[in-house]
């Protein structure tokens, strides 16, 4: 199942405190933060649009979010947050592997 790269700018004046629902949903989807405003999510949906439509209710109109499906042949990183290698090991970037989470 696909892994998606999700990047976001959260622009509410209250900062991350305002986005507890968004953070909780990323955690529910077993997202792994790889940079300040970026994470990887392994879900059963094959569509970035479906993923963003699922996350949109937790965001404000002034926020920005981007999602793209990634694969091992076209992915590389330097200095991602600790645990990224382990997350990728348990959530392979190849679409043949089963996904642990689902977006309804």
Image (cartoon, rainbow, N blue to C red):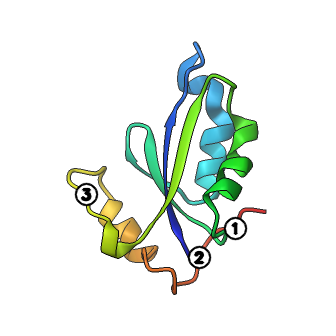
Q: Using the image, determine if residue 19 lies above or below residue 75.
A: above
Count of numbered circles in the view: 3
Q: CA distance from mark 2 to mark 1?
A: 8 Å
Q: CA distance from mark 2 to mark 3?
A: 22 Å
Which percent across, then down, holds residue 101? 64, 68
Please name the residue that numbered disc 3 is placed on. Answer: 77
**Quarter assignment of residue 90:** bottom left
Q: Using the image, determine if residue 70 lies above or below residue 50.
A: below
* SS for dot 1: loop
Q: Marks 2 and 1: CB-CB under 8 Å?
A: yes
Q: Residue furthest left?
A: 78
Q: Quadrant of the C terminus?
A: bottom right
First in sequence: mark 2 vs mark 3: 3
Dot label at residue 99: 2
Near mark 3 (Cα within 10 A), the count class, few <14, some 14-19 or many ≥20, is few
Near mark 1 (Cα within 10 A), the count class, few <14, some 14-19 or many ≥20, is few
Q: Residue furthest right?
A: 104
Which percent across, then down, holds residue 25? 66, 48
Q: CA distance from mark 1 to mark 3?
A: 25 Å
Please state which of the two labelled residues, at mark 1 or mark 3, is closer to the viewer: 3
Please name the residue that numbered disc 1 is placed on. Answer: 102
**Quarter assignment of residue 57:** top right
Q: Give 33 or 52, whichever is nearer the viewer.
A: 52
First in sequence: mark 1 vs mark 3: 3
């Amino acid at each position: 199942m696909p892994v998606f790269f999700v990047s976001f700018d959260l622009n509410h004046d209250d900062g991350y405190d305002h986005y507890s629902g968004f953070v909780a949903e990323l955690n529910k989807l077993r997202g792994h933060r790889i940079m300040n405003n970026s994470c990887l999510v392994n879900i059963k949906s094959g569509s970035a649009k479906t993923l963003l439509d699922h996350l949109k209710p937790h965001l404000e109109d002034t926020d920005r979010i981007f999602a793209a499906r990634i694969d091992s042949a076209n992915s590389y990183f330097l200095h991602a947050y600790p645990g990224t290698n382990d997350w990728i090991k348990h959530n392979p970037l190849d679409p043949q592997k089963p996904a642990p989470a689902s977006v309804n």
